Image (cartoon, helix red, strand yellow):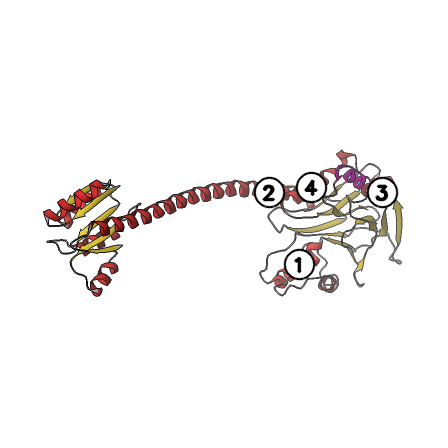
């Protein structure tokens, strides 16, 4: 290890050089502060022993200069002087000296003080190495996080690209939906599309859990709810309960460990006569919104899918009247928390839809108002669960359905 001796007395420098070289130090020595500065800039010196009183730059000024440098490695400084008053020690330490020895220097004391210097420098070296390693680890984590975040953003974009296209609906049905993932990507999924010339198929899905696993499972189930999969075979003849049963059996066969389940609503609407058929698998009951009436929950279905392959499901059949709407929502709406920890619940949803349905039944404006209500309820608190809603309104230009009593029928299938 390299050490620098700074003293204007040649005999002191010579004596200390002999003592230090015998102890294995690589010694530099200069007679004044300016030369010491140049020597420090040119060499990797770890310890400086400097006299206090010297012509030109004295020992205190040299230590202040050392401490002012932007350097990667710490330099341990020892102030050497015949001044041994307490105030002298305080003055030396205040400018940055690490230690203090008095003249004449006793060899045993010198070697003991340098032993302390070595230990402190070794600890600082280790801390610096750990700091570098921590920075490298942090950089790797940040880089990995950036890659993961970019992948999640792409996945979220793919999910959003698969959301419904309102322009593809039958003319007698208008719709609106909202979709708010709690973590960028969502275990919720919703869609609606035509099956046949005048039939609209729709669903709203909520897979248990959060994050990537829930999003992947949600995406896989949503792909099964496409005509090409074969799961929907028999929809027109047997209804949505039949589709739910087929989907449930398929998931139970693939979900042997029962490590997740999903709640789901599926249904279809005949755009020519307003016949709604709908079933639920453990999902929050949708609301039938009828102008001039209270919002009614539609209860028909069975267990969440993915639990029991032999579960039975039933679907409701309801004849929609012109102006009727159907509102579907995930439990993220009901369970949305405010800063006090209270859940949003069904009551404010009922109040909002019942007060708006007669004034403004436009689906998009109604959902926008509910979203605004929920935002006000949360008061800046992040969503604790994925939140999605789907609103379908039956509003044919010409409809010969008489406004008779509500026609509700339950049909069960295995």
Disc 4 packing (10 Å; few <14; some 14–19; many ≥20): many
The residue that label 1 is drawn on is 336
User: Percent x, y for residue 305?
Assistant: 78, 45
The label number, if any, that marks residue 157 in the structure image:
2
The quarter of the picture where the C terminus appears is top right
Is residue 231 shown left or right of residue 335?
right
Residue 207 inside the magenta-drawn segment: no
First along the sequence among labels 3 and 2:
2
Res 236 quadrant in image = top right
The residue that label 3 is drawn on is 310
C-alpha distance separating marks 2 and 4: 17 Å
Label 3 residue SS: loop
- 80 versus 145 height, above or below: below
The label number, if any, that marks residue 223 in the structure image:
none
First along the sequence among labels 1 and 2:
2
Please tell me whether mark 4 or mark 3 is closer to you in this view: 3
C-alpha distance separating marks 3 and 1: 33 Å
User: Percent x, y for residue 78?
Assistant: 23, 52
Please tell me whether mark 3 or mark 1 is closer to you in this view: 3
First along the sequence among labels 3 and 1:
3
Disc 1 packing (10 Å; few <14; some 14–19; many ≥20): many
Bounds of the magenta segment? 246-256
The residue that label 4 is drawn on is 217
Is residue 127 shown left or right of residue 314?
left
């Amino acid at each position: 290890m390299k050490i620098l001796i700074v003293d204007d007395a040649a005999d002191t420098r010579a004596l200390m050089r002999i003592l230090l070289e015998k102890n294995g130090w690589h010694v530099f020595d200069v007679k004044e502060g300016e030369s010491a500065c140049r020597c420090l800039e040119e060499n990797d010196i770890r310890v400086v022993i400097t006299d206090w009183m010297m012509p030109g730059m004295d020992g205190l000024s040299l230590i202040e200069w050392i401490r002012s440098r932007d350097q990667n490695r710490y330099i341990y400084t020892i102030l050497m002087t015949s001044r041994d008053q307490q105030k002298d020690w305080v003055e030396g330490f205040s400018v940055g000296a690490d230690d203090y020895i008095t003249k004449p220097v006793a060899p045993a004391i010198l070697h003991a003080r340098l032993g302390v210097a070595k230990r402190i420098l070794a600890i600082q070296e280790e801390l610096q190495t750990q700091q570098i390693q921590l920075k490298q680890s942090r950089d790797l984590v940040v880089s990995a996080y950036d890659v993961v975040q970019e992948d999640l953003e792409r996945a979220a974009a793919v999910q959003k690209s698969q959301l419904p296209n309102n322009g593809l609906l039958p003319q007698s049905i208008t719709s609106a939906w909202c979709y708010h993932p709690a973590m960028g990507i969502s275990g919720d999924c919703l869609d609606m599309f035509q099956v046949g010339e005048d039939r609209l198929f729709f669903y709203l899905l909520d897979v248990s859990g959060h994050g990537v696993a829930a999003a992947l499972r949600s995406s896989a189930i949503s792909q099964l709810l496409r005509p090409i999969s074969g799961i929907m075979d028999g929809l027109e003849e047997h209804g949505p309960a039949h589709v739910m049963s087929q989907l449930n059996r398929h998931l139970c066969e693939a979900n042997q460990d029962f490590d997740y389940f999903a709640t789901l609503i599926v249904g279809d609407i005949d755009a020519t006569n307003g016949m709604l058929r709908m079933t639920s698998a453990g999902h929050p009951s949708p609301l039938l919104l009828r102008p001039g009436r209270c919002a009614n929950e539609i209860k028909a279905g069975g267990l969440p899918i993915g639990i029991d392959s032999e579960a039975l499901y039933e679907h409701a059949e309801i004849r929609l009247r012109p102006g009727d709407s159907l509102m579907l929502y995930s439990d993220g709406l009901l369970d949305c928390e405010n800063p006090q920890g209270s859940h949003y619940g069904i009551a404010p949803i009922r109040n909002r839809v019942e007060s708006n349905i007669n004034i403004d039944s436009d689906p998009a404006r109604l959902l926008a108002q509910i979203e605004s209500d929920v935002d006000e309820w949360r008061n800046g608190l992040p969503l604790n669960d994925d939140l999605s809603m789907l609103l379908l309104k039956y509003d044919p230009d010409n409809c010969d359905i008489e406004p008779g009593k509500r026609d509700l029928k339950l049909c069960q299938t295995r």
